[in-house]
Structure formats: C-alpha cells, structure tokens
C-alpha cells in the first residue's frame, strides 16, 4: 500500500454526498501521469469519504485534464521495470471500477493517452468547452484520444478495449491503431461524452458531473465484476464490437506505425476472446516490446526534440 499523500476531496455545492477528487498539476500547469501521481491517486481512492454517493475525477489544471503518461519516466525503465509500472497503473485505475458508488470524469481540457484511459475507467464522461483564447477569442477545441501509435507504441492502461465501447467501434479501432485523436467538438458530435457543461468554469463542470451521477446512481450494478462499465467484453455490446472488429482488421496493416497497429489489433482480439485481464496483459507486453524497438525509441526521441523547440 502506498504512503503517498491523497488529494483533497471537495463536496460539490448543492449536491450532498457527491465528492470531487481534484488532481493537482505536477509538471508546471499540467497534470501528467508519473509514478508519484499514480501513487497519490491510489492513496486517494483508498480514502474516498464514507457515505459518499458519487465520485467526480477532475483536474486542477486550467487547460488540461491529464496530458498523458510521463514519457521521460517510461523511457528510463528497462523491461521488468516497465512491466511492473504498467501493471501498477492498471491496478490503480481499476480501483475506480471497484468503488461501490458511481464515478464520472470531468474533462476540462486535453485528455490524451493515459489521461483518457483513466477517464474511461469511470462510469461516465462529461466535458466542458475550451476556455477563451487570447484576447477573449474562442478557445481552440482541445484534443481527446489515444495518440500512442503515433509514437510507435500502444496504449498500456486499457485504452484498446475501452475506446471502442464508447464510440463507433470500427472508428475507434482505426484511430487507436494510427494514433489519430479527435477534438472536443468531435467528441460532442459523436456523443462520446454523456453530457456537456454550459461553460468552461469549474463550478459549471462539477455541477454537470454531479447531476449525471445523481441520474445514474444505479449504474454500479452493471460492474459488480470490478471491470469498467464500458469495455468491449460487456454482454450488451461484445457481439456488435466483434463484428466491427472483423470488418475493420483487414483494413489495418499490422506493421503500421512500427508495429503498433498490430499490437492494438492483438489487444482488441484478446479482450473479445479471452477477457479484460488478457487484454491488459497484451497491452503491457506489446508496449514493453514496442518501447524497446528502434522505431519506438526513435519516435519518442523525435517527440522530445520537437517539444524542446516549442
């Protein structure tokens, strides 16, 4: 059990028993999933207030929900260490699915990679429009998605099996296999998020999230197995997603994105045929393999170089 300091819980005004878990920025103004942050999330999920009726996972960053995993930290891990790190993150994210209360992610900005994966472990997704840009102009729609394949790696915290259960499954698999993200506007248009806040203000977003929790307080009954409410193996969607997978897998070159496309297909197939735990195992194995290929090392190195020039 971690000895990390849990984040503070705040009861949402006018919604008794609904608590917000606000993640604090840990890299400048951004929230980035590194080991220390995951440890604090674990400590927080062990400290959910007694009597809580619902939990909102929210971000204290002004423009980013969670920017994704800390690639610099991942880059320094050898094969056994990366395996352990990924397995630990999977266990912590999975704690959201074991809570006896409904959960919702309140997305207020970019939700990428691991950031979207932890959000999709929640029962619901609500989102706020982007805040104003420079000089009061409308803000640009922020990105949402799983961009890992663009770095010649694959998701490692369940994303391959979560995204197809929340949108058109064929489109989700295509996007994950190529690393193509969507925007907030796209997410609203395809109803990827259940509700949209009336403004970017934190109070409005938390109120919207709390209202969703109240309206969906019984959803926990559908995930008594401790797995995400929305994943491709649920009985009400497995056949449709399996059919979509069979239709789309022939369009995707397994060697694409340095082999990342094939890893995504393998993880989806494992989830459909063998179950949630098998899919997570494939993600860990494939991400570890891809991370240590020349394509994976080169793509991540190029990402760092591009970021340094901004």
Image: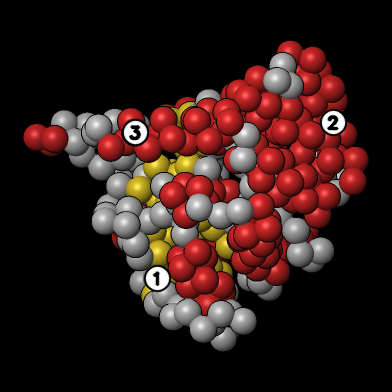
The image's colour scheme reads secondary structure
Q: Residue furthest left?
A: 135
The residue mark sitting in front, 2 or 1, is 2
Residue 47, picture quadrant: bottom right
For numbered disc 3, what is the local secondary structure?
helix
Cα distance between the residues tagged 3 and 2: 39 Å
- Tell me if 65 is positioned left or right of 187 in this view: left
The quarter of the image holding the C terminus is top left
Q: Nearer the viewer, residue 222 or 156?
A: 156
- Residue 182 x %, y %: 48, 29
Total numbered circles:
3
Q: Nearer the viewer, residue 180 or 21?
A: 180
Residue bearing mark 3: 305
How many neighbours does mark 1 have within 10 angstroms: few (below 14), some (14-19), or many (20 or more)?
some
Q: Mark 2 and mark 3 in contact (Cβ < 8 Å)? A: no
- Residue 231 x %, y %: 73, 46
Residue occupying the point 65% across, 30% down? 260
For numbered disc 1, what is the local secondary structure?
loop
Task: Decide if residue 172 is in sight here.
Answer: no
Q: Residue 160 bears which disc, if any?
A: none
Q: Is residue 306 above or below residue 67?
A: above
The residue mark sitting in front, 3 or 2, is 3
Task: Decide if residue 122 is in sight here.
Answer: yes
Residue bearing mark 2: 242
Cα distance between the residues tagged 2 and 1: 40 Å
- Residue 143 x %, y %: 42, 34
Residue occupying the point 50% across, 48% down? 75
Q: Residue furthest top?
A: 251
Q: Nearer the viewer, residue 209 or 266?
A: 266
- Tell me if 45 is positioned left or right of 266 in this view: left
Residue bearing mark 1: 12
The quarter of the image holding the N terminus is bottom right
């Amino acid at each position: 059990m971690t000895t990390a300091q849990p984040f503070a819980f705040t009861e949402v005004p006018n919604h008794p028993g609904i608590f917000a878990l606000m993640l604090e920025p840990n890299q400048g103004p951004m929230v980035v999933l590194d080991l220390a942050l995951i440890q604090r999330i674990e400590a927080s999920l062990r400290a959910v207030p007694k009597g809580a009726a619902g939990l909102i996972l929210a971000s204290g960053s002004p423009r980013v929900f969670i920017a994704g995993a800390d690639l610099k930290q991942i880059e320094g891990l050898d094969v056994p260490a990366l395996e352990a790190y990924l397995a630990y993150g999977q266990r912590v994210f999975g704690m959201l699915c074991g809570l006896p209360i409904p959960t919702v992610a309140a997305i207020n900005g970019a939700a990428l990679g691991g950031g979207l994966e932890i959000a999709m472990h929640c029962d619901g997704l609500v989102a706020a429009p982007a805040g104003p840009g420079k000089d009061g102009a409308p803000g640009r729609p922020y990105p949402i998605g799983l961009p890992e394949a663009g770095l010649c790696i694959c998701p490692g915290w369940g994303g391959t099996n979560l995204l197809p259960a929340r949108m058109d499954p064929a489109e989700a698999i295509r996007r994950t296999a190529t690393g193509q993200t969507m925007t907030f506007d796209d997410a609203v248009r395809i109803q990827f998020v259940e509700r949209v806040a009336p403004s970017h203000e934190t109070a409005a977003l938390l109120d919207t999230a709390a209202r969703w929790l109240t309206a969906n307080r019984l959803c926990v009954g559908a995930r008594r197995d401790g797995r995400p409410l929305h994943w491709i193996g649920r009985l009400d969607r497995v056949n449709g997603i399996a059919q979509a997978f069979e239709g789309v897998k022939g369009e995707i070159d397994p060697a694409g994105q340095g082999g990342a496309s094939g890893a995504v297909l393998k993880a989806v197939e494992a989830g459909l045929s063998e179950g949630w735990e098998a899919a997570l195992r494939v993600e860990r194995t494939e991400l570890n393999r891809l991370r240590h290929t020349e394509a994976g090392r080169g793509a991540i190195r190029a990402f760092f170089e591009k970021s340094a020039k901004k």
